[in-house]
């Protein structure tokens, strides 16, 4: 099961007084403005879970005024509605411009930055009897592979809207493909990996991570059919720690890693 909700507590770096050298002590950063010290609550698209988990220690070490980070993952569309309805959060990370606009129009965002893009790919369960049959999007239809079970994200989620764009460009209807609809790409990937589904259209970044873990196999979607979503981050208040998180995610260090390690595209 992949990440559903993570509470990433601030790292406490302890160095014993008797054994630590002067250089080791100076390497541990301290908060320069105690009044700004505090935790950060982030509502983020589920496709960001792996990268955020891998980088949380680095962020906390580099930002000692942040005492802890709490992440809540889900569909960007669902999270946007929660924010508009008053859900307490400091930062919103969205997998589409449309869902970020929902938050902007509500007046909740302070600033917004496009920091990455993500294309789509076909994920296939390695044990599926259809695994060797799927070479393109058209192979996901029942007419091409009778009995195949395929999932898509719901149309309101960014991953579902992306799938709809691809299917439309391929001349295929959602009804001809989808046996089930998942509320988020995290849920869809889990169902494919567990064998509940034979295949589905997910993000390329999900495929990069899953293949590293040898959990599934993926089939590229042709460039003339494929599309991509923009990823946006917004501070929802003027707290210094909120902006520090936004700046870190928008930084070359993080965005370069997104592209080289996780399969995201440049913004």
Image (cartoon, rainbow, N blue to C red):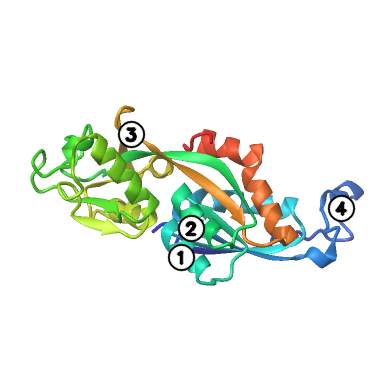
Label 1: which secondary element: helix
31 or 100, nearer to the observer: 100
Decide: few, some or many residues near mark 1? Use Cα within 10 Å; few <14, some 14-19, many ≥20: some
Residue 14 screen position, x and y as percent: 78, 61
162 or 17, nearer to the observer: 162
Decide: few, some or many residues near mark 3? Use Cα within 10 Å; few <14, some 14-19, many ≥20: some
Q: Is residue 173 above or below residue 11?
A: above
> N-terminal of the two: label 1 or label 4?
4
> Badge 1 is on which residue?
81
> Badge 2 is on which residue?
102
Q: Are marks 1 and 2 in contact (CB under 8 Å)?
A: yes
> N-terminal of the two: label 3 or label 1?
1
Q: Are marks 3 and 1 in contact (CB under 8 Å)?
A: no
Residue 24 screen position, x and y as percent: 84, 49
Label 2: which secondary element: helix
Residue 29 in sight in this render: yes
State how far apart marks 3 and 2 are (Cα): 25 Å
State how far apart marks 3 and 4 are (Cα): 51 Å
Quadrant location, the N terminus = bottom left
Between circles 1 and 4, the one closer to the viewer is: 1
Q: Are marks 4 and 2 in contact (CB under 8 Å)?
A: no
Residue 142 is drawn in which quadrant?
top left
> N-terminal of the two: label 1 or label 2?
1
Between circles 3 and 1, the one closer to the viewer is: 1
Between circles 3 and 2, the one closer to the viewer is: 2
Residue 124 screen position, x and y as percent: 26, 43
28 or 154, nearer to the observer: 154
Task: Give the number of the disc on residue 226.
Answer: 3
Task: Give the number of the disc on residue 12.
Answer: none
Residue 218 screen position, x and y as percent: 31, 38
Q: Is residue 53 above or below residue 207?
A: below
> N-terminal of the two: label 3 or label 2?
2
């Amino acid at each position: 099961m992949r990440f559903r909700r993570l509470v990433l507590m601030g790292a406490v770096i302890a160095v014993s007084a008797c054994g630590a050298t002067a250089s080791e002590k100076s390497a541990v950063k301290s908060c320069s403005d105690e009044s700004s010290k505090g935790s950060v609550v982030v509502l983020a698209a589920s496709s960001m879970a792996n990268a955020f988990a891998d980088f949380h220690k680095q962020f906390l070490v580099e930002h000692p005024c942040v005492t802890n980070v709490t992440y809540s993952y889900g569909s960007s569309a669902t999270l946007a509605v929660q924010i508009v309805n008053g859900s307490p959060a400091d930062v919103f990370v969205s997998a589409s411009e449309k869902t970020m606009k929902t938050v902007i129009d509500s007046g909740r965002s302070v600033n917004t930055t496009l920091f990455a893009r993500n294309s789509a790919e076909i994920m296939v369960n390695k044990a599926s009897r259809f695994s060797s049959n799927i070479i393109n999007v058209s192979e996901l239809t029942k007419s091409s592979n009778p009995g195949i079970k395929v999932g898509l994200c719901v149309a309101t989620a960014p991953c579902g809207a992306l799938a709809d764009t691809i299917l439309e460009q391929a001349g295929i209807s959602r009804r001809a493909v989808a046996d089930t609809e998942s509320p988020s790409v995290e849920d869809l990937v889990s169902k494919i990996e567990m064998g509940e589904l034979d295949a589905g259209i997910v993000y390329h970044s999900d495929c990069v991570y899953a293949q590293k873990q040898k959990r599934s196999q993926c089939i590229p979607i042709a460039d003339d059919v494929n599309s991509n979503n923009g990823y946006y981050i917004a501070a929802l208040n003027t707290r210094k720690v909120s902006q520090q998180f936004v700046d870190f995610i928008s930084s070359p260090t993080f965005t370069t890693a997104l592209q080289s390690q996780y399969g995201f595209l440049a913004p």
